[in-house]
């Protein structure tokens, strides 16, 4: 197994736990006091693009040993002439061809185009309690930046305040809270996407949403995700709540209605229960049957009035990937998110995460291959989003480019949650009266924040005054600091992406192509179809030399 370094001296970052390929710890805690790169970027923003201690140091790369097949073994091309994708108002003069002029806006969809200011979206933030606790930071941050956020599966089903009637949901305060928090700051960029699984479909979530919100909400069908190959899970430590979930139709393990389980819980031998969702398509035995069922589901949603429908699929094998791309294309869906193994979780079984499914880079490479097969046949291929262990600006560039021109967004799960945790902890420490409501975990600011950033929101967050300029001084009184942290991280990711794109002489996301990458080893070349590093441009080089 490849071991990733726990610290980066150039950036002065440290991983508390074992780092994954993404640069995040394998276990990311809401109470963490830092200092991984994503955590620090949520405070310092684009300053984290550069080595520390300017004027007293020089810095050199340590990333020269490329072993195995991974996103880190794709390298980004740079070119020494040309400019592609410039805005019509700009020229190819050196004064216009600067990285701040790179446009990172994107859009996805068929009949209705959904715009995003940056080519990222959140992963599905569903019924896990950590998503509920910090939702306002996540949602407001996504809305003010202008990128899509996904409400994951089962939110209605686990809402103890929700009311069922006539076989379907009548009201769900938690789902409404999540949607309303986003729409309050929505300005035409981004989207609120609500995901449905088997239980959500049975509970009538689609019908409830269209009646209450109309076309303000995008609906998403879920086939799976990269962290697990069974339905979603949460953990509950209250016996009555466990019984409630079982009565709602969920699988609860162990069964809280059994006398022996109740006794074990009361004695303390059992301390919690795992709630699981069901598998889809269990009564289907061929891809033709799955296609018919899927098309019926999409048709039903369109009859309800949904103008935008998306699909999320997991790191199954190649047959399922081809089905997802083909069926989503035929159904004219607006987006297909392809989530590879390496993706994050709220409570997926750990060894399942470690052992199942297709790693992101392999899955994404095949997604491009299959999409191109359809495109070459003249089909209008569904727009793609790539997900699974992606966190930094280089990951965004590589994922967009590996799947170009089909990939419109990069789905980032845990990375976009970190600023929400961090902002809530800082706000709770600064304003103790808010701590409990914010689910803050700190009593005081850590020393390194005081020393390196400051002791007020204005001092701590590099993006504070940009948010103030956008929303106005009065609005800042109600904007959670977690949302400002989301803005600050997004600004760092945006600036880093703009720099990579400018170096590749691509000034618009739509101008990116697979030729902007090369493979750092032969295994990565074989798996991705990206040419090996020293062979890219070699034919032209020899023409220049007169061969």
Image (spheres, rainbow, N blue to C red):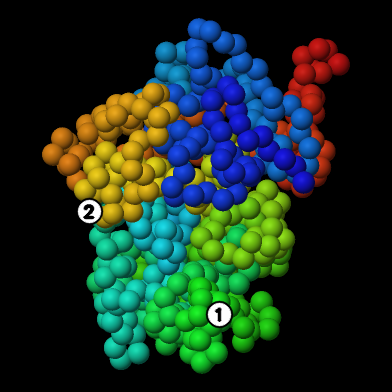
For image coordinates 67% across by 64% down, the residue present is 352
Q: Residues within 10 Å of mark 1 (few under 14, many from 20)?
A: some
Find residue 533 and report its horizontal and vertical position in percent. Answer: 76, 29
Tally the marks: 2
Judge depth for marks 1 and 2 and give the one in front: 1
Image-based side of 207 in relation to 269, left or right: left
Report the Cα–Cα distance between label 1 and label 2.
Answer: 38 Å
Q: Position of residue 408 (x, y in %)?
A: 50, 47
Which residue matches tag 1? 253
* Residue 78 seen: yes
Please give the name of the residue rendered at 72% of the width and 61% of the height, measured from the top-left corner.
355
Mark earlier in primary sequence (1, 2) = 2
> Callout 2 environment at 10 Å: few (<14), some (14 to 19), or many (20+)?
few
User: Whole-percent x and y of residue 32?
Assistant: 46, 44
Near-viewer residue (247 or 145): 247
Q: Is residue 380 above or below residue 529?
A: below
**Image quadrant in which the C terminus is located:** top right
Position of 463 compared to 280: left or right?
A: left
Question: Is residue 330 among the parts visible in the rendering?
Answer: no
Q: Callout 1: helix, strand or loop?
A: strand
Q: What residue is drawn where x is 42% and y is 67%?
A: 127
């Amino acid at each position: 197994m490849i071991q990733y370094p726990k610290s980066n001296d150039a950036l002065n970052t440290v991983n508390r736990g074992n780092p994954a390929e993404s640069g995040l710890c394998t276990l990311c805690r809401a109470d963490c006091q830092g200092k991984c790169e994503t955590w620090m970027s949520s405070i310092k923003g684009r300053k984290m693009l550069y080595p520390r201690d300017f004027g007293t140091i020089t810095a050199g790369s340590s990333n020269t040993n490329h072993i195995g097949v991974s996103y880190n073994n794709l390298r980004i091309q740079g070119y020494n002439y040309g400019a592609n994708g410039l805005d019509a108002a700009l020229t190819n003069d050196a004064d216009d061809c600067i990285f701040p002029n790179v446009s990172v806006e994107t859009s996805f969809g068929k009949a209705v185009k959904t715009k995003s200011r940056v080519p990222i979206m959140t992963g599905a933030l569903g019924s896990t309690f950590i998503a509920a606790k910090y939702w306002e930071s996540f949602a407001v941050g996504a809305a003010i930046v202008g990128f899509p956020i996904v409400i994951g599966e089962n939110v209605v089903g686990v809402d103890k305040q929700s009311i069922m009637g006539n076989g379907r949901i009548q009201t769900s305060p938690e789902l409404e809270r999540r949607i309303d928090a986003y729409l309050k700051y929505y300005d035409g960029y981004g989207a609120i996407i609500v995901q449905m699984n088997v239980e959500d479909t049975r509970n009538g979530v689609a019908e409830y949403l269209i009646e209450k919100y109309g076309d303000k909400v995008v609906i998403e069908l879920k086939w799976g995700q990269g962290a697990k190959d069974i339905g979603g899970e949460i953990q509950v430590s209250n016996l009555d709540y466990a019984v409630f979930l079982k009565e709602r139709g969920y699988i609860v393990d162990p069964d809280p209605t059994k006398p022996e389980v109740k006794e074990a819980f009361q004695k303390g031998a059992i301390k919690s229960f795992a709630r699981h969702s069901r598998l889809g398509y269990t009564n289907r035995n061929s891809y033709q049957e799955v296609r018919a069922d899927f098309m019926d589901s999409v048709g039903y949603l369109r009859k309800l009035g949904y103008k935008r429908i998306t699909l999320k699929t997991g790191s199954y094998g190649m047959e399922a990937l081809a089905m997802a791309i083909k069926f989503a294309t035929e159904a004219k869906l607006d987006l297909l998110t392809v989530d590879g193994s390496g993706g994050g979780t709220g409570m997926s079984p750990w060894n399942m995460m470690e052992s199942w499914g297709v790693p992101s880079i392999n899955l994404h490479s095949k997604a491009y291959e299959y999409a191109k097969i359809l495109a070459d046949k003249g089909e209008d291929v569904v727009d793609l989003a790539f997900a699974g262990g992606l966190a930094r600006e280089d990951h965004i560039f590589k994922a967009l480019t590996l799947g170009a021109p089909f990939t419109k967004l990069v789905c980032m799960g845990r990375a976009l949650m970190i600023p929400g945790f961090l902002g809530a902890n800082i706000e709770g420490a600064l304003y103790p009266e808010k701590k409990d409501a914010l689910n803050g975990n700190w009593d005081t600011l850590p020393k390194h924040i005081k020393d390196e950033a400051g002791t007020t929101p204005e001092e701590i967050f590099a993006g504070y005054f940009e948010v103030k300029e956008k929303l106005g001084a009065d609005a800042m009184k109600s904007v959670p600091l977690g949302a400002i942290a989301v803005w600050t991280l997004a600004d760092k990711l945006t600036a880093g992406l703009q720099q990579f794109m400018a170096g590749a002489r691509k000034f618009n996301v739509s101008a990116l192509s697979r030729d902007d990458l090369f493979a750092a080893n032969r295994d990565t070349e074989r798996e991705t179809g990206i040419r090996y590093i020293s062979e890219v441009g070699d034919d032209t080089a020899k023409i220049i030399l007169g061969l």
